Amino acid sequence: MPGPFITGDDLLTVIAAGLKTAKASLKSYWTEIAGRCVTRGWMDLATALLAKGYTEAQLDQWDDRVQYNTDQALFWAYTEGGGPTIEGQDNNYNRFDRAAAFLKQPPADIAIRIGGAMVAPGASGEAAAVASGCLNMAGGKLGVHAGTSFGLKSQRREGGYNEFGDAISEWD
């Protein structure tokens, strides 16, 4: 698996800028938080994009992987450590949660850039792992849109509806 594409030290620089302080002035707990959140942030993104059909090779070549890794790591760092607060402004760190945004979009609406060109899931010629669906994190299974066929010889159970109102099924 590729990534993460930033280091804890890179994230500390961004955290310090957001808190409007020198990196050397950050409290010591930020170092531990930054190291942990870099990996956690990348795994969030990789899980979301792999679930949408992108391949590991595509993620490794993704033009914006550093920025998205930084944003997702910052989301977790600010959530854990308490990010900047500005009176009268929205201090909601969810705006940095790129993985959640990817999971909410249908695969056809997600395209990443490789070499400056927009690339669809699995477009590199590699077989995409998932053509359509939404990740069901709680059960560890992939909820797939009803009627989607992957040629699997599995038993399908109806799973109700996801948060977007789409009928889903679970495969055993």
Image (cartoon, rainbow, N blue to C red):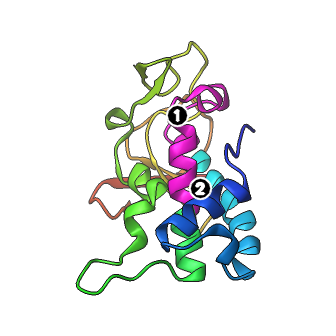
Kind of residue at disc 1: Gly
- Above or below, comparing residue 83 to residue 102 in the picture: below
In the depicted view, which residue is nearer to us: 13 or 73? 13
> For the residue labelled by badge 2, is the local secondary structure a helix, a strand or a loop?
helix
Residue 31 in percent (x, y) is at: 74, 71
- Above or below, comparing residue 156 to residue 94 in the picture: above
Residue 158 in percent (x, y) is at: 44, 57
The answer to whether residue 22 is left or right of residue 68 is: right
Query: What is the C-alpha distance between the residues marked 1 and 2?
Result: 15 Å
Asked where in the image residue 2 lies, by quadrant, the reply is top right
Asked whether the beta carbons under mark 1 and mark 2 sit within 8 Å of each other, the answer is no
Label drawn at residue 81: none
Q: Residue at x 75, y 80 (%)?
A: 28
Residue 103 in percent (x, y) is at: 43, 52
- Above or below, comparing residue 136 to residue 133 in the picture: below
Q: Mostly what secondary structure, the magenta segment? A: helix
Q: Which residues are magenta?
A: 49-73
> For the residue labelled by badge 1, is the local secondary structure a helix, a strand or a loop?
loop
In the depicted view, which residue is nearer to us: 136 or 125? 125
Q: Which tag, 1 or 2, sits closer to the chain's start?
A: 2
Q: Residue at x 34, y 47 (%)?
A: 105
Residue 168 in percent (x, y) is at: 40, 54
Check the image and name the residue furthest to the bottom.
87
The answer to whether residue 52 is left or right of residue 85 is: right
Residue 155 visible within the image: no
Label drawn at residue 44: 2
Residue 12 falls within the magenta-colored stretch: no
Q: Characterize the local packing of mark 1: few (<14), some (14-19) or many (20 or more) Cα atoms within 10 angstroms.
A: many
- Above or below, comparing residue 28 to residue 110 in the picture: below
Check the image and name the residue furthest to the top.
125
Kind of residue at disc 2: Asp
Q: Which residue is mark 1?
A: 53
